[in-house]
Image (cartoon, rainbow, N blue to C red):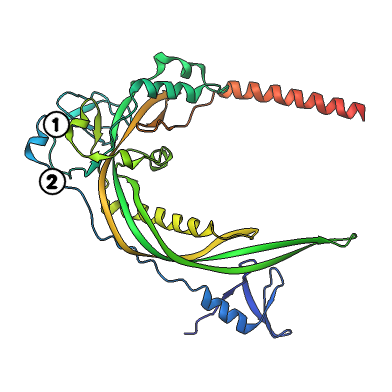
Amino acid sequence: MSTLLEYKCPKCGGAIEFDSASQQMKCPYCDSLFDVETMKSYDEAIKNEPDKMQWEKTSGNSWAEDELKGMSVYTCESCGGEIICGADTSAALCPYCDNPVVMKGNFSGALRPDCIIPFKLDKKSAKESLYNHIKGKKLLPKIFKDENHIDEIKGVYVPFWLFDCDTDSKVKYNAQRLRHWSDGKYDYTETSYYLVRKEGLMSFDRIPVDGSSQMPDDLIESIEPYDFREAVDFQTAYLAGYLADKYDVTSEQSIERANQRVKMSVEEGFKRFMQGYSSITVKNSSINLIKSNVRYALYPVWILNTSWNDKKYTFAMNGQTGKFVGDLPMDKRLFWKWFGAVFAVTSLISLAIGFLL
C-alpha cells in the first residue's frame, strides 16, 4: 500500500501540493511557492525527536515508631480526603469541602516527608488577606462581606513532590519578522518567515507538584512560589496546631505534571533569548533528562471554604508568603443594575453627540 507524503506550508501551516505549471510546491491557501529541494530540507529540519524524560529516583523516608504516637487519620466521606492530626489537634470538618470527617484510626504507612516549610503567617493574617481580597468588589454579594458568614479557616500542610533535574533540550520555533514602509501612495508590509532552532542545557530545582487530589492544581499553583530557603528537615513538632493532608497522588503519578512544567519552562526559557521577531510560536521540542531526583515535602496553606447560592467557593493563601487567591461570586442583580446604568449613560452620551452633529 502506498503512503501519501504531505508537506505543510511554512507560512500558514496548510497542506501544500506540487504545481505542474510552475514546477514548484504551491500552497492553495496562501499561494506561496517553494522549491522542491527547499521543502525537503525544511521537512528534515522540523522532524522532532521524542522526549526522554525518565526520572531516576523517588523520595520519602520511613517513619520512626515514636514519631507516629498520638497521630490520627480523619477521613472525609464526601470527597475522600484523609487528614492527619497530632495529639493536640482534632478535626471535625474537612478543610477542602467543609463536610464532616470521621476518625479512621491511628496514622500508619505512607512515606515520611524529607522537609517542611513551617507556617509563617497565622489565621489572623489569613482573614485580613481575605478582607483585602474582597475589598472594593462592587458586584460581590453583601453577605460575603459579613464576617459571620465566613467558615472557619484551616491551616493545612499540603503534600508536594519536588522534582530536580538537569535537561539537554532542543526546541524549534516558527518565527515571523515584519517590515513596513510606504511610497506615499501605498502602504506595504513584508513578512519574513523563519525556522529557528535552539538547544542547550537547563537546570531545575524543586519543581513542585501537588500530591493531593483534593486540592485543585490551578489553585495551589496560583499561590506559588514558596521560598525553599526557609525549609527545614521534617519534624512532627511542626504539625502541632495544624492539619496535614495525607498524599493520595504518588510521585510516579505526579511525573506527567512535572514533565509538563519542565517542557513549558524550557520552551519559554529559550524563547526569552530570541530578539527581533514580531511573533514566535513553538514548532516542537525534545527534552532529555540528564540527572533527576524527587523529594517529598509539606508546604503551608491556609484554606477557606464558604458557599453562596448552594455553590462552594474555595480560597487559598500561601502560609509562608501571604499570596492569596480564589474566585469570588457575583451578585447578578447588582450586575444587571450596574450594566443598565452604564448602558443608559452611554446611550445619553451617544444621543448628545448625535444631536450636536
Query: Is residue 39 found left or right of 208 in the rendered image?
Result: right
Residue 165, label in figure = none
Q: Nearer the viewer, residue 262 or 253?
A: 262
Question: The residue under label 2 is which amino acid type?
Answer: Ser
> Farthest front residue?
229
Residue 109 rendering spot, x and y as whole percentages: 13, 43
Q: Is residue 219 above or below residue 37?
A: above
Query: Is residue 214 found left or right of 279 in the rendered image?
Result: left
Question: The residue under label 1 is which amino acid type?
Answer: Met
Q: Disc 1 on helix, strand or loop?
A: loop
Q: Which residue is mark 2?
A: 62
Between tags 2 and 1, which lies in front? 2
Residue 71, label in figure = 1
Residue 267 rendering spot, x and y as whole percentages: 48, 59
Question: Where is residue 313, by image quadrant?
Answer: top left
Q: Of the residues under marks 2 and 1, which one precedes in the sequence?
A: 2
Q: Residue at left 25%, top 49%?
A: 295
> Farthest right residue?
357
**The C terminus lies in which quarter of the figure?**
top right
Q: Nearer the viewer, residue 154 or 81?
A: 154
Residue 180 rendering spot, x and y as whole percentages: 77, 60
Query: Is residue 47 found left or right of 233 in the rendered image?
Result: right
Mark yes or no: residue 107 visible.
Answer: yes
Q: Residue at left 36%, top 52%?
A: 257
Question: Where is residue 188, by image quadrant?
Answer: bottom right
Q: Is residue 253 above or below residue 146?
A: below
Q: Disc 2 on helix, strand or loop?
A: loop
Q: Is residue 3 above or below residue 135?
A: below
